Image (spheres, rainbow, N blue to C red):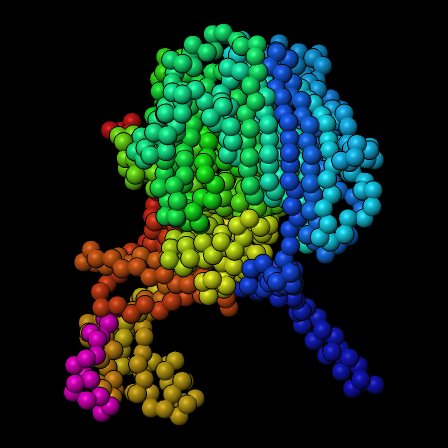
């Protein structure tokens, strides 16, 4: 009994001391748990599979703008092609304008409160004014024989019941008739609408989401019928559009697609100018001058004119129309074709828009085409509006001088940047057609990254656009240092990039800034430009005119570069970890041949002569100064000299590098969660410097700290981690050795007073 009790006690003691097991938490664990299994639709390499499919939606539309009442009337025929292997019993149609319906739930999902004091206009709008009714009024949903189709409207989605199952390979055509009140997007906000100019009773219309649009059906989730709450943008299938738009006869209009009745619409002078613009590669040509636009806006025509636009293989359609528009164009030569850079703007935009809008479009064409593929459409239009938004071949962009025509650097750079960004959306997601409703970063983040590259190119191509104090373009997003404040902020208000956009805090930083910075660091620091640019271009070409997912992007970047990046995607995209790498300690050593106690124990353990070992003595320990006086180098140890003489030929002895005199053990720690390369700059006593980049995999076996032995023939006087701020390190106070002593604000004040 005594023996049994003792055994049980020992087992219990053992259980109490034994640690619990755990799952693989290594930062370099592969992303198999997060990724779906490759299949015949999407391969493990990140490319479309042999059975990849996508649906097609073709539209024929007749649209009319009622300028007197600011209403849009539309009639469309949609032909939907089922290329999936599935039988479909119903179709889902997006009604995005219903976000502005009087009974919309969108205003109810955000918290609100009563301010202690507010303006009378805000009080009236918040508590007294009836809400604007901007939702779709669906008048009819019919088949092509005129028979009503049963349909159910659920907020911003409409389910249309099919008269019979739509089998794989079959097509179905149906008609929708509708109208809606166009919103004043200056007063009420919105991605499209009109801006009203009271002084001459005119409007500039920038129109989008104006028609019932087919939702996406794909292999990933079936119907993408997630409701539109106002933030997350759009998922749309490709198709062909033939759109007839009727507006007042004195309006100037342009939009997605080729203007098929140009000869009918244009005056003779406009046709001459247009043909000249097609051969003008250096300066824009005015199609409608400011003098002509100012004359037109003073009187309203009661007649009507129809503009006919046709677009092939686009996912959406937008247009702009006004009697206030100036119109200029220029040709841009790409590697495989010429395309047209176009601007529509009112006199309120000059001189800024006339100077830089179309040239910015041209510059964007060149950078994005270099980074991905040549722009496949024939034009891109930059439209002057007080907001930024994008559609195939057309974008709405802000930036306006004051009434005297003066503008600040901030206004100028803001306009150039938003034009680059919105024109760049032609690639992401208008052509590389990701699901914006779910993965905002796949269009905004990838586009903001490429925008950063384009901004730097713009400054090289148009240096006269830079202000005198700027040597490079002052990009807002992209450089690592610009995201530090966000990543080091309150974790309660930060979400991983891989979060639905509607549910993220700090939307701009999460969807634009952080993914753009992540890709820039990947390009400049982790992969290098050559490998990154090749893989990025491969992704773009694999998925142009298709529907990629985040996994397709992640897998392609690895497949085309032979770099395992699962650790990077996990850290930057799936977590809210941040970079913080510092220098914990630095130890200096001298070399000696004099045995010490540690050496004697080691020699005894391996049956070695203690005099045959090389001894390293830490600075401050007994014998350090004597060792340094003796030379402090390895080749000064007698046993090492004998080894060299016995084992190396005279020629080999001459080829041996100079024996290092200084030895250091540098311990780096990582208070931050992100694993990143350790970029180190060593400064020597003679003023020279050297850099070393330790790959991120240095953290694979210890996520807390790691030490490196440094042998040098020159004395190291200082060490700096991340000297160029490449890694978005949120705390640089631990990045130097000896540690920098920064003067406090109080000391600065005290010294200033003393002086």
**Residue at x 43% of width, y 41% of height:** 451
**Residue at x 69% of width, y 12% of height:** 129
Image coords of residue 676 (percent x, y): 45, 57
Q: Is residue 430 visible?
A: yes
User: Does 608 sit above or below residue 194?
Assistant: below
Residue nearest the viewer, comparing 242 with 477: 242
516 relative position to 31: left or right: left
Image coords of residue 321 (percent x, y): 53, 22
**Residue at x 33% of width, y 34% of height:** 279
Q: Is residue 163 magenta?
A: no
Residue 465 occupies quadrant: top left
User: Does 470 sit above or below residue 645?
Assistant: above
Quadrant occupied by the N terminus? bottom right
Q: Is residue 652 magenta?
A: yes
197 relative position to 458: left or right: right
**Residue at x 46% of width, y 31% of height:** 381
187 relative position to 427: left or right: right
Count of labels in the image: 0
Residue 205 occupies quadrant: top right
Image coords of residue 199 (percent x, y): 49, 7
Which stretch did the figure color magenta? 645-662
Residue nearest the viewer, comparing 397 with 147: 147
Residue nearest the viewer, comparing 28 with 213: 213
Residue nearest the viewer, comparing 469 with 406: 406
User: Does 698 sit above or below residue 554?
Assistant: below
Q: Is residue 227 visible?
A: no
Quadrant occupied by the C terminus? top left
244 relative position to 749: left or right: right
Image coords of residue 207 (percent x, y): 58, 26
């Amino acid at each position: 009994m005594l023996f049994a009790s003792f055994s049980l006690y020992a087992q219990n003691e053992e259980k109490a001391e034994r640690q619990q097991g755990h799952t693989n938490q290594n930062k370099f664990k592969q992303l198999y748990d997060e990724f779906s299994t490759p299949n015949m639709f999407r391969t493990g390499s990140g490319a479309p599979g042999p059975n990849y499919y996508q649906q097609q939606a073709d539209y024929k539309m007749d649209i009319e703008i009622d300028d007197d009442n600011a209403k849009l009337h539309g009639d469309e025929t949609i032909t939907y092609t089922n290329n999936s292997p599935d039988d479909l019993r119903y179709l889902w149609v997006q009604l995005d304008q219903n976000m502005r319906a009087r009974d919309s739930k969108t205003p109810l999902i955000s918290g609100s409160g009563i301010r202690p004091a507010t303006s009378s206009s805000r009080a009236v709008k918040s508590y007294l004014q009836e809400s604007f009714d901007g939702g779709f009024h669906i008048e009819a949903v019919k088949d092509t024989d005129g028979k009503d189709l049963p349909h159910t409207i659920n907020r911003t989605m409409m389910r249309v019941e099919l008269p019979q199952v739509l089998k794989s390979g079959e097509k179905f055509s149906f008609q929708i008739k509708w109208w809606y009140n166009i919103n004043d997007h200056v007063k009420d906000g919105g991605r499209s609408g009109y801006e009203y100019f009271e002084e001459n009773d005119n409007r500039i219309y920038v129109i989008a989401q104006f028609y019932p649009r087919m939702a996406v059906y794909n292999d990933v989730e079936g119907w993408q019928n997630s409701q539109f709450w106002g933030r997350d943008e759009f998922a749309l299938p490709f198709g062909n559009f033939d759109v007839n738009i009727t507006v007042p006869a004195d309006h100037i209009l342009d939009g997605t697609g080729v203007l098929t009745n140009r000869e009918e619409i244009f005056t003779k002078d406009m046709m001459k100018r247009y043909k000249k613009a097609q051969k003008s590669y250096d300066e824009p040509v005015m199609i409608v001058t400011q003098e002509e636009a100012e004359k037109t806006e003073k009187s309203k025509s009661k007649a009507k004119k129809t503009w006919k636009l046709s677009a092939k293989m686009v996912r959406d359609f937008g247009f702009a129309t006004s009697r206030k528009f100036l119109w200029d164009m220029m040709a841009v030569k790409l590697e495989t074709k010429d395309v047209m850079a176009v601007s529509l703007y009112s006199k309120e935009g000059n001189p800024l828009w006339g100077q830089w809008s179309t040239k910015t479009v041209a510059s964007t064409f060149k950078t994005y085409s270099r980074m991905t593929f040549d722009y496949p459409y024939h034009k891109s239009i930059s439209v002057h509006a007080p907001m930024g938004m994008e559609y195939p071949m057309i974008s709405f962009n802000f930036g306006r001088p004051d009434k005297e025509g003066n503008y600040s650097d901030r206004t100028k750079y803001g306009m150039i940047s938003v034009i680059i960004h919105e024109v760049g959306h032609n690639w992401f997601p208008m052509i590389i057609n990701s699901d914006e409703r779910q993965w905002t970063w796949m269009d905004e983040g990838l586009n903001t990254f490429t925008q950063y590259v384009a901004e730097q190119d713009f400054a090289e191509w148009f240096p006269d656009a830079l202000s005198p104090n700027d040597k490079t373009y002052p990009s807002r997003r992209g450089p690592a240092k610009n995201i530090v404040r966000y990543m080091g902020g309150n974790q309660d208000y930060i979400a991983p990039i891989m979060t639905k956009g509607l549910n993220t805090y700090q939307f701009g930083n999460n969807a634009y800034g952080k993914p753009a910075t992540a890709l820039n660091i990947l390009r400049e620091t982790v992969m290098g430009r050559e490998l990154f640019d090749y893989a990025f271009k491969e992704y773009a070409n694999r998925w142009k005119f298709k529907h990629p997912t985040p996994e397709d992007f992640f897998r392609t970047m690895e497949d085309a570069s032979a770099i395992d990046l699962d650790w990077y995607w996990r850290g930057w995209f799936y977590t809210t970890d941040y970079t913080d790498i510092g220098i914990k300690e630095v130890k200096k050593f001298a070399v000696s041949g004099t045995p010490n106690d540690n050496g004697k124990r080691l020699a005894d353990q391996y049956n070695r002569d203690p005099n045959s070992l090389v001894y390293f003595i830490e600075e401050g320990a007994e014998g350090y100064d004597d060792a340094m006086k003796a030379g402090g180098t390895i080749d000064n140890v007698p046993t090492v000299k004998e080894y060299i003489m016995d084992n190396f030929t005279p020629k080999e002895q001459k080829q041996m590098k100079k024996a290092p005199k200084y030895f250091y053990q540098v311990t780096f720690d990582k208070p931050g969660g992100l694993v990143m390369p350790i970029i180190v700059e060593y400064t020597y006593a003679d003023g020279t410097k050297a850099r070393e980049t330790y790959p991120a995999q240095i953290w694979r076996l210890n996520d807390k700290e790691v030490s490196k032995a440094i042998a040098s023939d020159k004395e190291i006087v200082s060490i700096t981690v991340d000297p160029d701020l490449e890694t978005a390190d949120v705390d640089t106070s631990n990045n130097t050795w000896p540690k920098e002593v920064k003067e406090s604000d109080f000391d600065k004040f005290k010294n200033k007073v003393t002086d």
